[in-house]
Image (cartoon, helix red, strand yellow):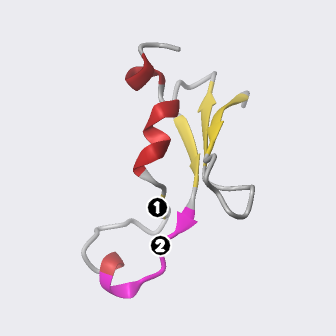
Amino acid sequence: MALRKLGKDPDSKHDGSPTVYLDEESGNYVLQGWRVTDTERLSQLDVPEHETVIEFPRRMMQFFPEVTGGQ
């Protein structure tokens, strides 16, 4: 799997998250973010056992090529 880092949250206080990657082989995005552990929020979702839920800030949308016109 060849991952290409598209961008890291410039406002991250911990200098390591969230981050957006592109899997150049599959064309899918790999997102690093804050794990959602709040049971009330999770109860509103239907998350299969083999999946997880993360949260990342709206400002991170700037790193998706679909938003930047392919940049």
The vertical placement of 65 against 49, above or below, is above
**Quarter occupied by residue 15:** bottom right
Q: Nearer the viewer, residue 37 or 48?
A: 37
Q: Dot 1: few (<14), some (14–19), or many (≥20) neighbours within 10 Å?
A: few
Side (left or right) of 4 relative to 37? right
1 or 2: tag closer to the N-terminus: 2
Residue position for label 1: 55
Q: Nearer the viewer, residue 49 or 45?
A: 45
60 falls in the magenta region = no
Q: x, y percentage for residue 68? A: 44, 20
Residue at disc 1, secondary structure: strand
The numbered disc on residue 36 is 2
State the residue at coordinates (48%, 29%): 64
The vertical placement of 71 against 23, above or below, is above
Q: Amino acid at mark 1?
A: Glu
Side (left or right) of 52 relative to 10? left
State the residue at coordinates (53%, 24%): 27
Side (left or right) of 2 relative to 24? right
Q: x, y percentage for residue 61? A: 44, 38
User: Contact (CB < 8 A) between labels 1 and 2?
Assistant: yes
State the residue at coordinates (56%, 47%): 31
Q: What is the count of numbered marks?
A: 2
- In three-dimensional space, the C-alpha distance between marks 1 and 2, rounded to whole angstroms, equals 6 Å
Tell me the magenta residue range.
34-40
Name of the residue lying farthest toward the bottom: 39
Q: x, y percentage for residue 57? A: 46, 54
The vertical placement of 43 against 6, above or below, is below
The vertical placement of 12 against 1, above or below, is below
Q: Amino acid at mark 2?
A: Val
